């Protein structure tokens, strides 16, 4: 019985292999190559894939690499010769999955699972393909498509925590808040105690108050933050806060990133807004004070002072002295840093050093009665 190959499959296979025969219009070969059986093509695909794994660095598999291209072409040839052979369909799907050719992999697994719908391992691989298609759609801003891919992923593998997480994130950004809450609960059941999931589950409960644009900006900013794109994340959180001024989490995240970036003015703006909102915490007010001092004396000086104070309260007086000294070196007009430098020196009975520091503090802030008092004591050596 003769086998008729679909023209599109022949062209794809020829393209993957380089198609030298199709490119030739003159000088035909004197002898046609012997026809390859489906089994031979499948074995060739396996051999080429094995060679590719050895030849290329781990994790770099790509359809543009010659050996992988040839392996895919051989697998296509095997399927074209015996389209009802589940083994060959699976081989093709596995190759496309390994090289990250997600659309071809999706079609490959769909074809295989029609014949073997109960193959649990294959369903997990097919779910991974759906996840990658979903994430690609998410990054393109195609939220409806992304949601459909993530939903299909969960149908194939209900225990896929990554798909549940991103299905929830996509639903959140689309304003589907009840669905997002249910999906975050599902993700948390798969990853109990996960801090990011817990954070977003709580955020989702209040997202309706902030609206879709602000919530989407926040979510995208968080994705930038997770990917290490701090500048883009800061801009995204600021956008969310501008869009929904009551969005306290957006103000907090913007303030934290601004402090990390050394941008005192941006931090001051963010924490001023956060501290004025219901639900503001002691941490918000603390960070506001750091931003205020940073705007006045320089953020590095303010952070050095706060670190020194933490060492002082922990009992590390020597470390505290060095920290307070560093703060005064970073900002010579930082009266409070001079006063605390005087204090640690006085407590260490370094009266001359304490008098020097207290003298600077009083000069900068004549209303500081405590520093004036201890300046006199230090000068008297008692």
Image (cartoon, rainbow, N blue to C red):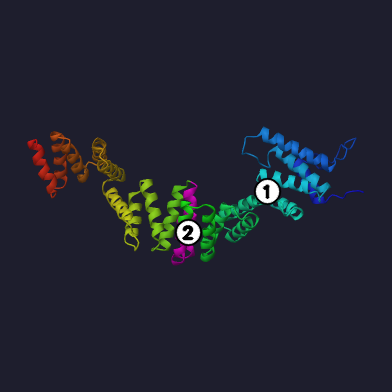
Q: Residue at label 1? A: 121
Please state if 240 lies on the left or on the right of 143 as rendered. left
Height in image: 94 above or below 155? Answer: above
Task: Describe the element under mark 1 as helix, strand or loop.
Answer: helix
Q: Tags 2 and 1 in contact by the CB under 8 Å rule? A: no
Hey, which residue is sitting farthest top in the picture? 55
Query: Which numbered marker is on residue 303?
Result: none
Q: Quadrant of residue 377?
A: top left
**Horizontal and vertical percent position of residue 170:** 55, 59
Q: Is residue 91 above or below residue 236?
A: above
Q: Nearer the viewer, residue 154 or 358?
A: 154
- Residue 224 on the magenta segment: yes
First in sequence, mark 2 or 1: give its number.
1
Q: Which of marks 2 and 1 is in front?
A: 1
Query: Which residue is denoted by mark 2 in the rendering?
Result: 201
Secondary structure category for the residue under label 2: helix
Residue 97 x/y as whole percent: 67, 46
In front of the other: 326 or 249: 249
Q: What residue do we see at 38% from left, 60% from top?
A: 248
Residue closest to the far left: 380
Measured along the vertical axis of the image, is residue 20 above or below residue 209?
Answer: above
Residue 371, percent from left and from top: 14, 45
Q: Which stretch did the figure color magenta?
A: 199-227
Q: Quadrant of the C terminus?
A: top left
Query: Residue 223, image x and y in percent?
Result: 50, 52
């Amino acid at each position: 019985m003769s086998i008729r190959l679909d023209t599109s499959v022949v062209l794809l296979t020829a393209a993957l292999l380089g198609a030298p025969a199709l490119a030739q219009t003159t000088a035909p070969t004197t002898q046609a190559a012997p026809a390859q059986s489906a089994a031979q093509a499948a074995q060739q695909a396996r051999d080429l894939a094995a060679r590719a794994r050895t030849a290329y660095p781990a994790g770099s598999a790509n359809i543009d690499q010659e050996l992988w291209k040839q392996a895919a072409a051989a697998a296509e040839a095997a399927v074209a010769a015996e389209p009802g052979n589940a083994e060959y369909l699976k081989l093709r799907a596995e190759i496309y999955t390994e090289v990250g050719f997600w659309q071809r992999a999706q079609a490959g697994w769909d074809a295989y699972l029609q014949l073997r719908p109960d193959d649990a391992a294959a369903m997990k691989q097919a779910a991974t393909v759906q996840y990658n298609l979903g994430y690609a759609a998410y990054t393109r801003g195609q939220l409806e498509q992304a949601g459909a891919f993530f939903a299909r992923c969960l149908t194939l593998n209900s225990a896929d925590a990554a798909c549940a997480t991103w299905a929830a994130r996509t639903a959140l950004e689309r304003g589907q808040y009840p669905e997002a809450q249910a999906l975050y609960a599902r993700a948390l059941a798969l990853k109990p105690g996960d801090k990011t999931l817990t954070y977003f589950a709580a955020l989702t409960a209040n997202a309706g108050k902030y609206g879709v644009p602000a919530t989407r900006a926040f979510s995208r900013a968080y994705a930038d933050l997770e990917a290490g794109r701090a500048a883009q994340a800061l801009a995204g959180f600021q956008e969310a806060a501008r869009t929904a001024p009551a969005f306290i989490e957006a103000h907090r995240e913007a303030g934290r990133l601004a402090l990390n970036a050394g941008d005192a003015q941006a931090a001051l703006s963010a924490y001023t807004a956060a501290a004025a909102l219901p639900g503001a915490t002691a941490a918000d007010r603390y960070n506001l004070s750091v931003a205020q001092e940073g705007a006045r004396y320089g953020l590095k000086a303010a952070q050095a002072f706060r670190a020194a104070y933490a060492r002082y309260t922990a009992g590390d007086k020597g470390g505290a002295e060095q920290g307070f000294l560093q703060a005064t070196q970073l900002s010579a007009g930082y009266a409070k840093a001079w006063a605390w430098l005087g204090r640690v020196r006085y407590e260490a009975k370094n009266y001359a050093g304490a008098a020097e520091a207290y003298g600077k503090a009083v000069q900068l802030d004549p209303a500081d009665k405590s520093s004036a008092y201890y300046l006199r004591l230090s000068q008297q050596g008692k």
